[in-house]
Amino acid sequence: SEKKDKRKQEENQEELHQLEEMRERLIRRIGIHGADEKVLKAMLRVPRHLFVPEYAKKGAYIDTPLEIGFGQTISAPHMVAIMCDLLELSEGLKVLEIGAGSGYNAAVMGELVGKSGHVYTVERIEPLVDFARENLKKAGYENVTVLLDDGSMGYSKCAPYDRIVVTCAAPDIPEPLLEQLKPGGIMIIPVGDYIQELVRIKKDPEGKIHEEKRGGVVFVPLIGKYGF
Ligand code: SAM
């Protein structure tokens, strides 16, 4: 049985090595399209295969959204790269995410804000809150907090935030989110019903809002008081 254990260990190591190689290839490919070096490095460090259901592990490094149950998805890696890029994340920032899903995007942001920063991620589906918490624990992220709530109202308890990212599509920009964004802060949000536009919002130091459209995207809907 000792021999069996050893063989099992070797197989596990071999699988891990294969997954790491696939991850490197994926991130290199995303890099060709001009993603920020810092974001790519963070994505290299996050084991996406720990954020998908066990049966989908082999597909974790294909650049596509994957189902995580309850009609929800983990976003495609290139979309995570685009959003993190637009957010201009750096060490020490306090971030609010709406739509924790698998916790993967929060983990990538956790890498980018480091130990001196923090990511709060809100999810409305309770089993997904558990899923995200487990995944983040397995991957070792202690600077990410997963919260069960209707994130369309933001999360006022820990506001204001340097950055806000919404990973589901809203009919309009929810007023509470604008209020919970710090002056000088940045918010990324998909807006629209069927095909959506990724909108980047900057709140200037005087509190004035500037909006910029950054291209078409497809996300699952934001459900809730300020959602659909
Ligand atoms: N960021 C996630 C990841 O890395 O796996 C992917 C998020 S998935 C595309 C969108 C998520 O938003 C779903 O899990 C959905 O349940 C959640 N959601 C929708 N409306 C919400 C709301 N009002 N508050 C919190 N979460 C919400």
Image (tube, helix red, strand yellow):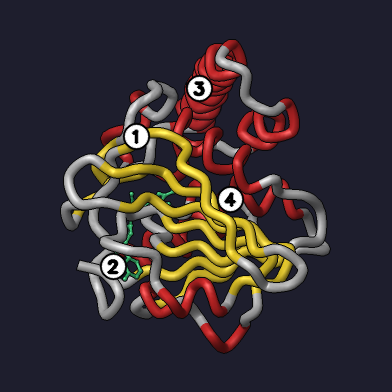
Amino acid type at mark 4: Ala
- Cα–Cα gap, marks 2 and 4: 18 Å
Kindly identify which residue carries mark 1.
216
- Inter-mark Cα distance, 2 to 3: 26 Å
**Residue 46 % position (x, y):** 60, 39
- Numbered circle sitting on residue 127: 2
Q: Amino acid at mark 1?
A: Gly
* Gap in angstroms between the C-alphas marked 3 and 4: 18 Å
- What residue sits right under mark 4 in the picture? 107
Q: Earlier in the sequence, mark 2 or mark 1?
A: 2
Residue 19: which numbered mark, if any? 3
Residue 154's place in the image compared with 135, above or below, is below
Q: The residue tagged with tag 2: helix, strand or loop?
A: helix
Label located before the other in sequence (3 or 4): 3
Spatial distance from mark 2 to mark 1, Cα to Cα?
Answer: 30 Å
Q: Looking at the picture, which amino acid does disc 2 mark?
A: Pro
